[in-house]
Amino acid sequence: MKDFFELAASRRSTKQYDPNVEIPHSELRELLEVAGQAPSAWNLQQWHFLVFDKKEVQEKLLPIAYNQQQVVDASAVICILGDLEGDKNIDPVFDPSVAAGHMTPELKEILAGQIRGAYKRSDYPRDAAILNASLASMQFMLAAKAKGYDTCPIGGFNANALIEEFNVSERYLPIMLITIGKPTQEARATDRLPIESLITYAE
Ligand SMILES: Cc1cc2nc3c(=O)[nH]c(=O)nc-3n(C[C@H](O)[C@H](O)[C@H](O)COP(=O)(O)O)c2cc1C
């Protein structure tokens, strides 16, 4: 287990993976569970994880990801799907909290009213899907690094082709792919803009 600051600083987007490394389902499940501990609006957890961990399905993904070889060489690829119908999670998320005494039934009804209002707005479901699923994605990448795996977020893929090839329900929007595996070489170093240029203190 690395110190968090060292871990965040050492995460790099890896594109060269050892194709012979398999990631056990139990380990992947553990990482996805940590990803799911990310915060989300009203705790609706607007994400779903579509896992590609068989070489034959990763091969099907290759042209969809514009032939980025890393999707085949990685031990697995996760497509993080954003949930466009997060309001359907009101009961599954809140009822156990009410039963456990973490939330009163009155609070559940207040929050449910807010959620139904938000999901009636035309732009909200898509914004919420992208925003919340992205938080889970980042948490997944840091958890993977902590477990000794490298990752790469991938926006370069044809979302419509992925939906069609893998029968993704209309409920979900593909947000990004994340490759995960053991690197064969150190990822290219990257630099960041000076932090001073990215901070404004509001007056
Ligand atoms: C939304 C998003 C989309 C990206 N798409 C790709 C991609 O399609 N292919 C790729 O090799 N890297 C992709 N990257 C990785 C970036 O190039 C990388 O994060 C950036 O250059 C900084 O490098 P670092 O992550 O190693 O610090 C993507 C990153 C993000 C956040």
Image (cartoon, rainbow, N blue to C red):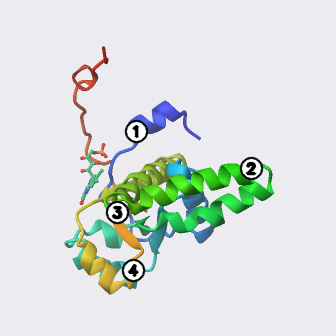
Visible in this render: residue 34? no
Question: Cβ of disc 4 within 8 Å of ligand 1?
Answer: no
**Nearer-the-camera pick, 199 or 69:** 199
> How busy is the neighbourhood of tag 4: few (under 14 within 10 Å), some, or many (20 plus)?
some
- In the rendered image, residue 64, in percent from the top left (x then y), is placed at 24, 76
- In the rendered image, residue 197, in percent from the top left (x then y), is placed at 21, 23
Q: Residue at x 22, y 29 (%)?
A: 193
**Cβ–Cβ under 8 Å for marks 3 and 4:** no
Kind of residue sitting beneath label 2: Thr
Q: Residue at x 33, y 73 (%)?
A: 72
Mark 1 or mark 2: which is in front? 2
Label 1: element kind:
helix
Q: How far, Cα to Cα, is label 4 from label 2? A: 35 Å
Mark 4 or mark 2: which is in front? 2
Sequence-first disc among 1 and 3: 1
Sequence-first disc among 4 and 2: 2
- The residue singled out by tag 1 in the image is 10
